[in-house]
Image (spheres, rainbow, N blue to C red):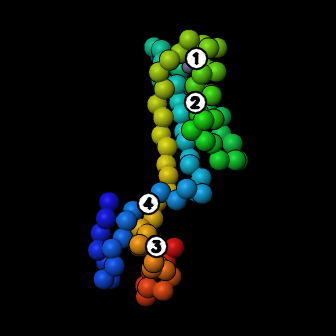
Amino acid sequence: MKRHFRHIDWTLKEVPSADVRVHVVCVSGIPQCTEELPRSPDPVTREDADAWKLSHFTATGHRRFEELSSRVVQWDPDDDVDPRTILGVTT
Ligand SMILES: [Zn+2]
């Protein structure tokens, strides 16, 4: 997504170094299982979530999951513009 603001073109980009947050819950069965990917103080990656889904599937046969994930994005100007020099723009 691109937008023009304060005479500069901005592109909405994912911040690659930011943590991705993933939440997974098993929604298989009647009644639903509701077992969740265990909470961790460390960031949970998509690979961690996939490993847990495989582990839960092979242990229980449950194959349906609800998964929520988040990412951090920010508006970035072109590479030749330092956004810190633009009045009113912060990180
Ligand atoms: Zn389950």
Q: Position of residue 47 (x, y in %)?
A: 60, 35
Q: Position of residue 60 (x, y in %)?
A: 60, 13
Q: CA distance from mark 3 to mark 4?
A: 13 Å
Relative vertical location of residue 69 with respect to residue 59 in this rendering, above or below: below
Residue sitting at x 65%, y 47% = 43
Q: Which mark is residue 79?
A: 3
Residue sitting at x 58%, y 25% = 53
- Name the N-terminal-most of marks 1 and 2: 2
Tell me the amino acid under the disc marked 4.
Lys
Q: Nearer the viewer, residue 69 or 36?
A: 69
Q: Are marks 3 and 4 in contact (CB under 8 Å)?
A: no
Tell me the amino acid under the disc marked 2.
Asp
Q: Are marks 4 and 2 in contact (CB under 8 Å)?
A: no
Residue sitting at x 43%, y 60% = 13
Disc 3 crowd rating (10 Å Cα; few below 14, some 14-19, many 20+) is few
Q: CA distance from mark 4 to mark 2?
A: 24 Å
- Name the N-terminal-most of marks 3 and 2: 2
Mark 3 against mark 2, which lies toward the viewer?
3
Q: Which mark is residue 39?
A: none
Q: CA distance from mark 3 to mark 2?
A: 35 Å
Q: Can the viewer see residue 36 in this picture? A: no
Which residue bears the numbered disc 1? 57
- Name the N-terminal-most of marks 3 and 4: 4
Which residue bears the numbered disc 2? 50
Tell me the amino acid under the disc marked 1.
Phe
Mark 3 against mark 4, which lies toward the viewer?
3
Q: Can the viewer see residue 53 in this picture? A: yes
Mark 4 against mark 1, which lies toward the viewer?
4
Q: Position of residue 75 (x, y in %)?
A: 41, 68
Per the image, label 2 sits on a secondary structure element best described as helix
Which residue bears the numbered disc 4? 13
